[in-house]
Image (spheres, grey):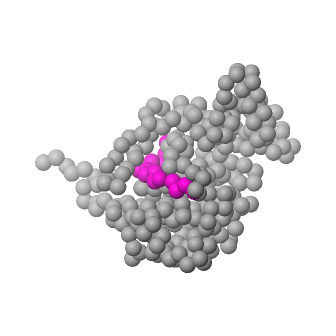
């Protein structure tokens, strides 16, 4: 009789889901949809549900917004496992990941300001007569100006205190992981479909800044792995960014979870709900008498409990 595979006797682990809001404002209906979709899929697949507070940007995140998030989720009746992970308590984890990429010479310092990049990229429009190159979020695609800087000269500029960011050399990173990078999308029925990643369209993304020593991309892949997340459920606005996450996971030797991207809610002007556009908060809805049950019903979620 052939030997059983090594995992034969181990019961398969439970799927792990997470909701990961940033405390830079109060939650709105779009966040409620994201949290409730995580809750629904975790229930459906018999999974665990974790909460992560993404507060790496200490300039924009505020403790009262963390309290607000906890109060709003509690009011909605969504129960998360404890403890809640707060990214600001784990900068060391992101620093180690960054150090390993630097040791492989996949990261370089960039001294260009946002204005300089805009000017360089948009200047090409008039020269070439076409649209300027943009990343999937519509931002000017960084043209790689600092990639060729002499290492000793760059070190001198850093030592002199010149402001800079650290960028991933995307072409080298893609070459390092080889062909076939991608991830599996999963649906409500448990169906799966492979999606090939196209990270090149993002160019050399920023991995760290002086004021924020990690980026969303780096922190999210490190945390998903450290928290054992198997199923990432988030809005379609983060679908394209997943291509970056797959590259970082492969470079850092981390597993790639399954992904599901839910619809986005739009306002009366047809734009995505956003804190920056002052979309009505859940707290304000609560104050004007909307109940958690009404929100669950409106968003097609099952009652709490
Ligand atoms: N913190 C991100 C946000 O609030 C979500 C991150 C994620 O789900 O990967 O938009």
Q: Is residue 284 left or right of residue 76?
A: right
Measuring 70% from the left and 53% from the top, which residue is drawn there? 213
**Residue furthest to the top:** 128
Q: Position of residue 291 (x, y in %)?
A: 50, 77
The range drawn in magenta is: 248-267
Asked if 234 appears above or below 43 in the picture, the reply is above
Is residue 115 visible from the viewing direction of this image? yes
Q: Position of residue 118 (x, y in %)?
A: 75, 36
Instruction: Residue 300: name its quadrant.
Output: bottom left
Depth check, front residue: 242 or 166: 242
Inspect the magenta stretch and tell me whether residue 83 lies in it: no
Instruction: Residue 52: name its quadrant.
Output: bottom right
Q: Position of residue 229 (x, y in %)?
A: 45, 58
Q: Is residue 154 left or right of residue 24?
A: right
Depth check, front residue: 259 or 254: 259
Measuring 45% from the left and 48% from the top, which residue is drawn there? 256
Q: Is residue 171 left or right of residue 194?
A: right
**Residue furthest to the left:** 1
Q: Position of residue 216 (x, y in %)?
A: 61, 52
Is residue 14 visible from the viewing direction of this image? no
Instruction: Residue 152: name its quadrant.
Output: top right
**Residue furthest to the right:** 160
Asked if 163 appears above or below 56 in the picture, the reply is above
Q: Is residue 10 left or right of residue 283?
A: left
Depth check, front residue: 5 or 296: 296
Count of marks placed on residues: 0
Measuring 55% from the left and 45% from the top, which residue is drawn there? 241
Measuring 40% from the left and 45% from the top, which residue is drawn there? 184
Q: Quadrant of the C terminus?
A: bottom left
């Amino acid at each position: 009789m052939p030997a059983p595979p090594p995992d034969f006797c181990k019961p398969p682990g439970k799927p792990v889901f997470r909701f990961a809001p940033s405390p830079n404002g109060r939650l709105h209906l779009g966040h409620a949809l994201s949290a409730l979709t995580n809750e629904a899929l975790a229930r459906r697949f018999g999974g665990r549900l974790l909460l992560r507070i993404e507060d790496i940007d200490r300039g924009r995140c505020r403790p009262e917004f963390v309290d607000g998030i906890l109060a709003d989720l509690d009011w909605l009746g969504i129960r998360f496992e404890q403890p809640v992970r707060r990214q600001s308590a784990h900068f060391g984890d992101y620093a180690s990941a960054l150090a390993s990429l630097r040791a492989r010479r996949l990261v370089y310092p960039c001294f260009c300001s946002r204005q300089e990049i805009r000017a360089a990229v948009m200047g090409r429009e008039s020269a070439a007569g076409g649209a300027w190159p943009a990343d999937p979020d519509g931002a000017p695609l960084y043209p790689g100006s600092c990639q060729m800087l002499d290492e000793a000269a760059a070190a001198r500029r850093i030592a002199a205190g010149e402001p800079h960011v650290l960028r991933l050399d995307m072409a080298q990173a893609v070459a390092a992981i080889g062909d076939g990078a991608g991830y599996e999308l999963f649906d409500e029925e448990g169906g799966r479909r492979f999606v090939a990643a196209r990270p090149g369209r993002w160019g050399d993304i920023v991995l760290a800044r002086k004021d924020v020593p990690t980026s969303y991309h780096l922190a999210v892949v490190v945390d998903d792995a450290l928290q054992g997340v198997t199923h990432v459920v988030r809005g379609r606005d983060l679908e394209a960014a997943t291509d970056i996450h797959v590259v970082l996971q492969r470079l850092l030797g981390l597993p790639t979870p399954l992904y599901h991207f839910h619809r986005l809610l739009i306002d009366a002007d047809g734009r995505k709900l956003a804190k920056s556009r002052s979309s009505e908060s859940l707290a304000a809805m609560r104050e004007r008498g909307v109940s958690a049950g009404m929100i669950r019903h409106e968003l097609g979620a099952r009652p709490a409990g």
